Image (tube, rainbow, N blue to C red):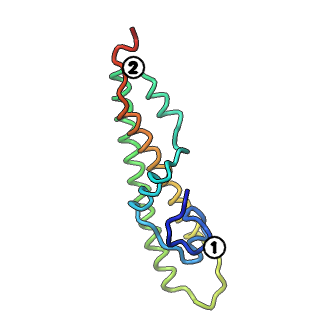
Amino acid sequence: MKDLPDNKTGYSQSHPWYYVLGGRVLSPAEIQASVELNAYSAAISEDILKIAKRLEPQRSEGLRELRGAIKQSLQRDIDIYLKFALKLKASRQYADSNAELTCNDIHVSMSLKHNHLCYGYARLMNCEDHLNQKTDLFAFL
């Protein structure tokens, strides 16, 4: 995925060293916008495709149920991401400016949770794309 314009670290937000080098923490809305802008396709998963192949009304019901589960999972990931963001902010405030830069657990956690949000938003977008597709109600004939 492409970086947002203000990235001067040389790393993407999905890499721990982005955070080690002082990269800006993106809001969940910015991550979502980046996923939508870049048409992140890695989230085209078997479970979505399997449900999308069903006949109506099981197809729409299944996709709506899956969308709800994806939203719940995404909200959990957002909550954790925001907690990590606060920990990162605190660690940056109390960091010794003369100390050697090292990659710590918080940097890895931020990059992993960023990736989880990207994947979650992409899955949600993919599921909603399938829900928005109109199917032939008489395809079984």
Q: Is residue 95 left or right of residue 59?
A: right
Residue positioned 49% across, 33% down in the render: 47
Q: Nearer the viewer, residue 127 or 96?
A: 127
Residue at which label 1 appears: 103
Mark 2 crowdedness (10 Å alpha carbons): few <14, some 14-19, many ≥20 = some
Q: Nearer the viewer, residue 63 or 2?
A: 2
Residue 9, compared with residue 72, is above or below; it is below
Residue at which label 2 appears: 55
- Amino acid identity at mark 2: Leu
Which quarter of the rendered picture does the C terminus lie within?
Answer: top left
Measured in 3D between alpha carbons, the distance from the residue under mark 2 to the one under mark 1, in whole angstroms, is 50 Å
Helix, strand or loop at disc 2?
loop
Rendered location of residue 26, percent (x, y): 45, 67
Q: Is residue 62 left or right of residue 110?
A: left
Residue positioned 49% across, 74% down in the render: 88
Mark 1 crowdedness (10 Å alpha carbons): few <14, some 14-19, many ≥20 = some
Residue positioned 51% across, 54% down in the render: 116
Q: Is residue 26 left or right of residue 108?
A: left
> For residue 41, which numbered disc appears in the image?
none
Looking at the image, is mark 2 or mark 1 earlier in the sequence?
2
Quarter of the image where one finds residue 33: bottom left
Helix, strand or loop at disc 1?
loop
Rendered location of residue 35, percent (x, y): 47, 53
Quarter of the image where one finds residue 124: top left
- Amino acid identity at mark 1: Cys
Residue positioned 45% across, 59% down in the render: 31
